[in-house]
Image (cartoon, rainbow, N blue to C red):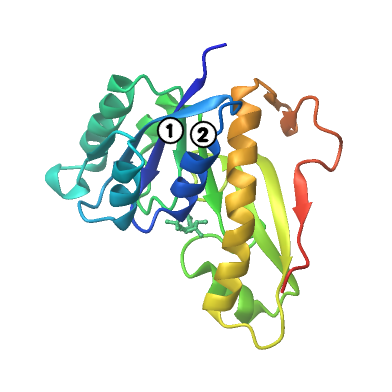
Amino acid sequence: MAKLRVGILISGRGSNMAALIRAADEPDYPAEIACVVSNIADAPGLGIADKAGVATAVVSHQGYPNRESFDRVLSTTLERHGVELVALAGFMRILDRWFVERWAGRLINIHPSLLPAFKGRQVERQTIEAGVRISGCTVHLVVPDLDAGPIVAQAAVPVLPGDTEQMLSARILRQEHHLYPLVVRWFAEGRVVETDRGVEVKGVAPGGTLLFSTEP
Ligand code: GAR
């Protein structure tokens, strides 16, 4: 069966991108990485993708007069690579409504909190300052509102006394690297279905879309 062609958008380090590339290297993984696109020319993730033999492109947001013209070039770049699912992986630009509607139902994001808590930036700092004891990460469908959209899956981790932002971020990131490849697999297997109440993942046991880690 043909593999689902995934386009990954990054702005920086690209550790989630690397986790997806590693997963897609497995022969029985049902998705392949069609391209990695960055809005930042020297994003470290681009080098990792290059080394792994994945096609890369840079679409700098600075080269366009407005958000929509940037988004249109981004979209054309993804189309040129035959992309069927777009995965945002540390992509730090807000996408215009036009782009979100163009890729509706086929555009996902990973965010380092249990949404709808702690949207936006400096998420780990917000989490620690709020004093919550459990945090984690969320994969959701992208809608025009920031860090909103139906939740596909979440992974929970403890927030420990004495955690710095870096410590919490590293703990969450380890779960992100499990969760994102799992969710992309579900998309490729055609399991992810939008319903009146959000998203249902067909054929995955109730509770199977929530991972728990108690690793320090
Ligand atoms: C990840 O923690 C991801 O959840 C977060 O940026 C980091 C990117 O790391 N994304 C957001 O905050 C989006 N709102 P990576 O470049 O190593 O994958």
Residue at 76% of width from left, 42% of height from top?
Answer: 209
How crowded pointer 1 is (Cα within 10 Å; few <14, some 14-19, many 20+) is rated as many
Q: Is residue 2 left or right of residue 187?
A: left
The image position of residue 198, as x and y in percent, is 70, 34
Question: Residue at the location (36% across, 41% down)?
Answer: 52
- Residue furthest to the right: 206
The answer to which of 209 and 182 lies nearer the viewer is 182
Camera-side residue of 129 and 212? 212
The label shown at residue 156 is none
Residue 166 rendering spot, x and y as whole percentages: 52, 76
Whether 105 is drawn above or below 160: the answer is: above
Query: Where residue 214 sits in the image (x, y, percent)?
Result: 78, 67
Marked residue nearer the N-terminal end (1 or 2) = 2
- Residue extending farthest to the top is 1
Residue at 60% x, 73% y is 168
Q: Name above or below for residue 177 compared with residue 106.
A: below
Give, as a three-letter code, the residue at label 1. Answer: Val
> Which mark is on residue 24?
2
Residue 75 lies in what quarter of the image? top left
